[in-house]
Image: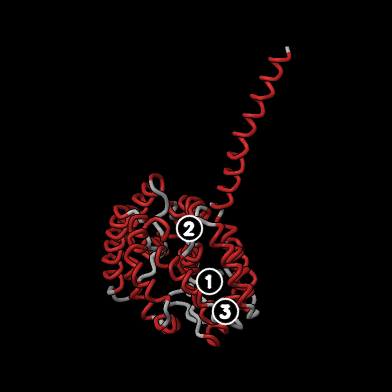
Amino acid sequence: MIRISYFHKMRTLLFILIALPTCFYSSNAQQLHDYSKYHKAIISVEELIIKENYRAALDQYEEIFDSYEFVFSRDYKIAVQLAVHIKDFNSAFKYLKLGITDGWTLKEIKRDRFLKSLTTMGGWDGIKNEYNSWRSGYISRINQDLKEVVKKMYKKDQKFAYKYLFKIGQKAKERYGNRRGVPHVRQQITKLYSILESKGYPGEKLIGESQWMTTVLTHHNSVSKEFVSNDTLYPSLRPKLLDAISRGEMDPYDLAMIEDWNIAVKSDRKDTGYGYLDMPSQEELSQCNELRRNLNIRLIETRNDLVNIQEKTGINFYLAGGPWAKGKIVPTNQ
């Protein structure tokens, strides 16, 4: 009996020792892939930046970079600029390397006037010497076949958009959208469904490019009021996009732009959106910010405060909004 009991105890202990690392790994893996926490953490960094507590902001960036397997490239770019601003050049070169491994090109870096001082320092030679190696690592990480598929979808979408653009008058645009645009966007969304099921969302994480599919989806949501008002494709797709955000495959700022088009077209630009296509009124501001909270993107006030810091320091915060929202989003009095 003693020998059996001893064997039983040892077997139980061995099971626990084997199981424990698995439990820790599973918990850690879950944390690493929960990008809602990532985006909330980035907003916390931005709040430190607004207070001009740049050292603390940089330290928090370090924690985020250590905690997530994929980092959105703009966050590396901002971290490099912060490091240069406070003259922490060791950190600047460190994050510059990480940015390159995440797709930042030497050409883009050289064009950035804010980073010009780095090109005159000793660490710059190491960047140039190792660039091709780091770049090749990035290229091998990207799904090149999927990237080519999405690029073709984007080009096809642009052809439709140009034809739509040159139709004279809104009624002519609506007719063209309903006649030619509807079959086009349905085909595009069907293909995206297939990609989501087999590969995931084709954004920065998977193909190194987020704007191609964002453009395809914004065009889907702006074909015509008649189509968008009765559309069932996008509403059924939306939960999958939210899942893609939680996995880090989609940028929530891209979804906000896609949603803004949907809201604007369905309501004739009367309903409150995210503030990119149409400035919210003072009365709509709280509703606009609630939409932003639900996606874990910065509030209007935070964006405007970052614009102030941007103007004061020259740091580029890569604020979303494209050609529709440049600089501050100022609520109207209506």
Q: Which mark is residue 306?
A: 3
Q: Is residue 183 above or below residue 320?
A: above
x and y percentages locating residue 217 in the rendered image: 40, 61
* Residue lying furthest top: 1
Q: Residues within 10 Å of mark 3 (few under 14, many from 20)?
A: many
x and y percentages locating residue 303 in the rendered image: 57, 76
At 56% from the left and 69% from the top, the residue drawn is 272
Question: Which is more foreground, mark 3 or mark 2?
Answer: 2
Front in this rendered view, residue 195 or 35: 35
Residue 260 vs residue 158: left or right?
right
x and y percentages locating residue 300 in the rendered image: 59, 75
Residue 120 vs residue 4: left or right?
left
Gap in angstroms between the C-alphas marked 3 and 2:
24 Å
Gap in angstroms between the C-alphas marked 1 and 3:
28 Å
Per the image, label 1 sits on a secondary structure element best described as: loop
x and y percentages locating residue 330 in the rendered image: 57, 82
Per the image, label 3 sits on a secondary structure element best described as: helix
Gap in angstroms between the C-alphas marked 2 and 1:
38 Å
**Amino acid type, label 2:** Phe
Residue 181 vs residue 5: left or right?
left
At 62% from the left and 29% from the top, the residue drawn is 15
First-in-chain label (3 vs 2): 2
Per the image, label 2 sits on a secondary structure element best described as: loop
Q: Which residue was labeled with disc 1?
A: 270
Q: Which residue was labeled with disc 2?
A: 70
